[in-house]
C-alpha cells in the first residue's frame, strides 16, 4: 500500500473514495534545486483530489510528511508589496473586531517571516508566532519578534499559555489548509483561546477555484480545499462556531473566516448563511461538479500546451514571472521544461539561481529581463499581476507580451 495515501477524511474520519482528479506524480512545489542537484533523484508523490461525501471536504488523496516541506521554507510573505498591505489591513481589522476587554495577545500559526506579527506589534498588541521553518522563525526572532520554531501542538499551547497567557486573537493564514491533523489543531486552538477570543483563518476559496478554474492552487502543501460547509462541520466538533466570513482578493480569491467558542459574544453574521447558500447553488456538494472540474482541468492543459507549442514554432522566446508553488503545478502538469520556457524571474532571493522542481527551469532575478528580454512573459504569479506589470512595464513598451495562463492563456493589453 502507498505509505502516503490517506484512507480517512481529515475532518470527519469517513473512509475516502478514489480520486476524481489526478494531476500525476509530482515533485514538491517549493523544493527548488541547486545546479549540483539536477542529476539527483527528486522525491515525487501523486497529486490527486478526493471528495468526502459526509462533510463535503475536497482534499488530497496523498499526504507528504510535513518535515519534507516545511522545515526549510522558501516562500516569504514580505516579498510582495501587495501582501505587505494586505496584512497591515488584516491586523487592524482583527483588532477592531476583538471583543476581548483590552486585547492582550495575538498568536499567528504559520507566522512565516513575521509579517503579520510586525503589524500586530505596531498596533500595540503582544504577538507570538509559531512556525516550523527554522530559517523563517530565526529571521523573525532576529528582527525582534517572538517566533516559536515548532508545529502548533499541545506542547506549543502549554509554552504560550505559561509565558503569555490565553490568546485573544489566533490567526492561521494560508496555513490551515496545509495541516493534516486538523482536528488536533482545532482542539489546541480551543485550549489556547480566551473565552471571548476569536480564531481567524484565511485560505483560497474552493468556490473560486472551481468557478475560475484555478487548478494551480493544487499542490502537496495544500492538503484541504475548503468550503464553508466542511469547515462548519469540523468546528462544531471542537466547541467552535463560525460567526462571520468575508471574501478577500488574496491569491485570486480567498475567504477569511472568523470563529469563536460556541456561545461567545459575537452575533452570527448573515454572511455565514449567504455563503453556505452560494456554495449550495454552486453544487459544491454534488459529485458531478467535481467531475466537471476534472474534465475542464484536462482541457486547460491541452490549451496551454498548444499555446506554448505554437509560440515556440514561431521562434518566440518565452519566460515566466514568478516561481510560486502554483506555477510549478502548471509547469509540471503540462510537462513543460526549459525548451518550452527559457527562464523564470522571481523577486524572492531564496529562489534565484535555483532550478524549478521537476522541470528544471532556471530562476533568475529581474535583471535578466533587461539583458535577455523575452517575446512572451507568462505571469505564473498571476494574483500579483498588477504589481508585476507596473514593475516591468518597460518590457511591454518594447514589445514583450504579458500572458495570464488561467483559465485560458490571454494577452494583457
Image (cartoon, grey):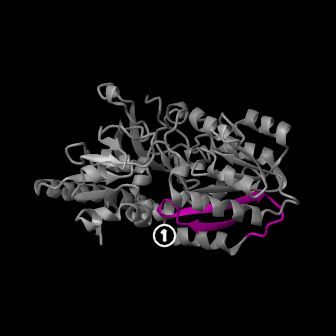
The answer to whether residue 359 is above or below residue 231 is above
Q: Position of residue 342 (x, y in %)?
A: 24, 46
Quadrant of image for the N terminus? top left
Q: Position of residue 139 (x, y in %)?
A: 61, 38
The answer to whether residue 299 is above or below residue 76 is below
Q: Which residue is mark 1?
A: 282
Is residue 224 visible to the viewer in this orientation of the structure?
Answer: yes
In-front residue for pair 61/316: 316
The answer to whether residue 70 is above or below residue 167 is above
Residue depicted at x 30% and y 48%:
368
Q: Could you tell me which secondary element the residue under label 1 belongs to?
A: loop
In-front residue for pair 405/205: 405
Residue 89's quadrant in the figure?
bottom right
Q: Position of residue 232 (x, y in %)?
A: 66, 58
Query: Would residue 358 appear left or right of 259 to someone viewing this image?
Result: left
Q: Position of residue 287 (x, y in %)?
A: 44, 59
Residue depicted at x 35% and y 46%:
23
Q: Is residue 267 magenta?
A: yes
- Give the magenta range: 242-268
Q: Is residue 345 magenta?
A: no
Amino acid at each position: 500500500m502507498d505509505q502516503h495515501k490517506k484512507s480517512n477524511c481529515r475532518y470527519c474520519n469517513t473512509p475516502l473514495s478514489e480520486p476524481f482528479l489526478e494531476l500525476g506524480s509530482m515533485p514538491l512545489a517549493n523544493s527548488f534545486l541547486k545546479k549540483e542537484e539536477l542529476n539527483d533523484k527528486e522525491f515525487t508523490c501523486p497529486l490527486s483530489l478526493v471528495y468526502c461525501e459526509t462533510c463535503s471536504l475536497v482534499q488530497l488523496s496523498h499526504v507528504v510528511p510535513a518535515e519534507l516541506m516545511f522545515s526549510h521554507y522558501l516562500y516569504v510573505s514580505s516579498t510582495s508589496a501587495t501582501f505587505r498591505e494586505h496584512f497591515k489591513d488584516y491586523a487592524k481589522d482583527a483588532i477592531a473586531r476583538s471583543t476581548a476587554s483590552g486585547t492582550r495577545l495575538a498568536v499567528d500559526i504559520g507566522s512565516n517571516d513575521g509579517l503579520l506579527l510586525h503589524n500586530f506589534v505596531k498596533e500595540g498588541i503582544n504577538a507570538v508566532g509559531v512556525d516550523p521553518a527554522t530559517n523563517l522563525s530565526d529571521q523573525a526572532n532576529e528582527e525582534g519578534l517572538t517566533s516559536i520554531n515548532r508545529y502548533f501542538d499541545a506542547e506549543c499551547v502549554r509554552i504560550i499559555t505559561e509565558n503569555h497567557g490565553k490568546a485573544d486573537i489566533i490567526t492561521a493564514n494560508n496555513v490551515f489548509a496545509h495541516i493534516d491533523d486538523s482536528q488536533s489543531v482545532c482542539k489546541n486552538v480551543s485550549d489556547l483561546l480566551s473565552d471571548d477570543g476569536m480564531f481567524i483563518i484565511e485560505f483560497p476559496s474552493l468556490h473560486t477555484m472551481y468557478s475560475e478554474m484555478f487548478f494551480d492552487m493544487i499542490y502537496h502543501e495544500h492538503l484541504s480545499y475548503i468550503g464553508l460547509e466542511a469547515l462548519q462541520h469540523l468546528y462544531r466538533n471542537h466547541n467552535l462556531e463560525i460567526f462571520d466570513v468575508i471574501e478577500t482578493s488574496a491569491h485570486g480569491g480567498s475567504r477569511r473566516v472568523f470563529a469563536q467558542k460556541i456561545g461567545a459574544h459575537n452575533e452570527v453574521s448573515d454572511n455565514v448563511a449567504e455563503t453556505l447558500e452560494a456554495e449550495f447553488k454552486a453544487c459544491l456538494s454534488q459529485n458531478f461538479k467535481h467531475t466537471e472540474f476534472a474534465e475542464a482541468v484536462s482541457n486547460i492543459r491541452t490549451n496551454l500546451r498548444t499555446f506554448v507549442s505554437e509560440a515556440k514554432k514561431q521562434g518566440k522566446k518565452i519566460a515566466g514571472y514568478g516561481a510560486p508553488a502554483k506555477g510549478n503545478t502548471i509547469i509540471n502538469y503540462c510537462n513543460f521544461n526549459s525548451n518550452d520556457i527559457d527562464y523564470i524571474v522571481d523577486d524572492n532571493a531564496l529562489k534565484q539561481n535555483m532550478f524549478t522542481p521537476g522541470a528544471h527551469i532556471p530562476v533568475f532575478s529581474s535583471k535578466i529581463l533587461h539583458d535577455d528580454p523575452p517575446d512572451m512573459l507568462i505571469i505564473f504569479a498571476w494574483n500579483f499581476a498588477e504589481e508585476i506589470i507596473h514593475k516591468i512595464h518597460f518590457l511591454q513598451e518594447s514589445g514583450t507580451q504579458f500572458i495570464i495562463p488561467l483559465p485560458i492563456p490571454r494577452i494583457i493589453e
